[in-house]
Image (tube, coloured by chain):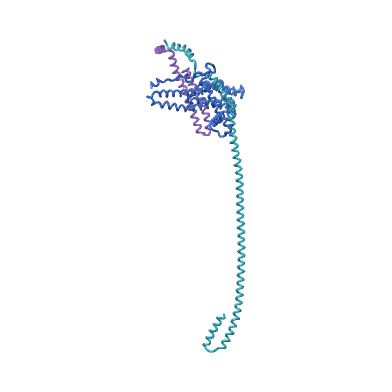
Amino acid sequence: MLSLIGHFFAQTAPDEFLDGLSAIGAGIGYGAAAIGPGIGIGIVVGNAITAMARQPESAGMVRTTMFLGIAFTEALALIGFVVFILIKFA
Amino acid sequence: MSLITAVVRFAQEAPAHAEEAKSNPILPAWNEVIWGAISFTILFVLIAKYAYPAVKKGIDARADKIRSSLDEAERTRDEANTILEDYRRQLADAKNESARIIEEARQSADKLRQDLKKQAEAEVAEIKSRAQEDIAAQVERAMGDLRARVADMTIELTEKVVQRNLDRETNLALIERFIDEAGSAA
Amino acid sequence: MTPVLGALHFPPIEELVEWPGIFLKDTPFEVNKVVLLMWAGAIIVFGLFWAAGRAASSGNLVPTGIQTVVEGGIDFVRNDIILQTMGPAGLPWTPFLVTIFFYVFITNIFEVIPFVQFPVNARMALPLFMSLLVWVIFNYMGVKAQGFGGYFKSMLLPPGVPKALLPLVALIEFISTIFVRPFSMAVRLFANMLAGHLLLVTFAVLSAALFTKSALAVILPLPFAMLILLTGFEILVAILQAFIFTILTAVYIGGAMHPEH
């Protein structure tokens, strides 16, 4: 089994193989990086809506804070995106 | 060839691969950083020094204008309210005054009517009593006249009866003539 | 589907975001499309403010046109950003934050302007410069307002943390304030605009490829409708990212000035 994989590796050009691996890594990496922020933004916005519905008079402040929270949460996904670009194109 | 050696070979070749990629879409290009810094700095200086104060002045002028207009409106409204209050009071005064005048007029008219009525009643009573007196005097005089006349006529009749006391026909004729005479004399 | 995709040439990312120099080539001051757009953005923002200022100072008390836009932007930055995050003490920062808001917005909105169609902030240069500038400013303001020791004390030692955890918390706070803040601020703007640009390019390339294959025009409306939808979405993103960059600047500067938050 192991020798079979080794045989396959030996027959593939090294550059091509590295490109393939990096593409897989980039895709999986970005996908994984998007999971947490997706859930996080959902929680942030959901709670912001609850707060706004409970106290509509403080909706302005809640909205500002909500955008701040989204921005902080979203940063992780964006760093994942940057890493994706780095792996794939750099 | 085993997996380990293959991986080691890729690892050895990886640095050469990385060096090939000259430009990186993530890393900033220096010319863009320099020009971005220059653009932003110049823009900020221009806006902070010239453009923003002008806009701010306009906003403040408008705020002042609105505030002063509101104050003015408030003042005018207060003034109008006091004037209205004044007018209301004057109107109430005038109403009271007119009511008083009407009441007075009514009272004086009543008094006048009472007076006139009393006066008229007095006059009527006077006229009535005078008329009664007149009538009484007339009656008195008429009775006196009548009495004198009846006496005269009685005497005259008596004379005639005494002169021509003959027969029945003569008596009748005499009475008739007497009555005629009395009628024509009356 | 396969023949269409086989004919589809998706340009590599270098081709999308790296522009050749136009003049002053091979010097540190090389001018390319991105630099031209930076100039254009600065000129447009200043032009807007200049026109609004001239209209305002000519006694035009009822705002119209450009004046409404600029004064609305200033009002927004003042009431919804500064007063909400920094309080009245932050009002002297209004010109700086207004400049950031309008400059970021204009350079973002180039993404959907026909024949320009490139957001300056999809290059790292401008976000990096602005976030480093904000980093310098908020550290300077923190040291100025609380003194060197007081600033680092309030930054590193948040109240109400158990003593055993303090070294760890201090390390995390130091890294997050000094390193992660400018980095995440720059990356947030840059990555949002780059991702939006790539999305638009993807659907534009797909639509263009389908236009040449008349047999498959049946599915043309799908990518084309997506392109239109995404253009609207990118306008929203351009505004939102300008807002977020400005509000983060306000939060960082305000937090350095008043550590109790």
Q: Position of residue A2 (x, y in %)?
A: 40, 13
Report if residue A79 is visible in the image.
yes
Residue B63 locus on image (x, y percent): 58, 34
Q: Nearer the viewer, residue B59 or A83?
A: B59
- The residue under the point 41% across, 26% down is C222
Chain B colour is: cyan
What hue represents chain A?
purple
Where residue C83 sits in the image (x, y, percent)? 57, 30
Asked whether the viewer can see residue B29, the reply is: no
Question: For residue C89, which quarter of the picture?
Answer: top right
In the picture, the quarter occupied by the N terminus of chain B is top left
Query: Can you name the residue that lies furthest to the bottom here?
Result: B166
Q: Position of residue C152 (x, y in %)?
A: 59, 22
Instruction: Tell me, by letter, which chain the rendering colours blue.
Output: C
Left or right: where C179 falls relative to C231: right
Residue C211 is left or right of residue C146, and the answer is left
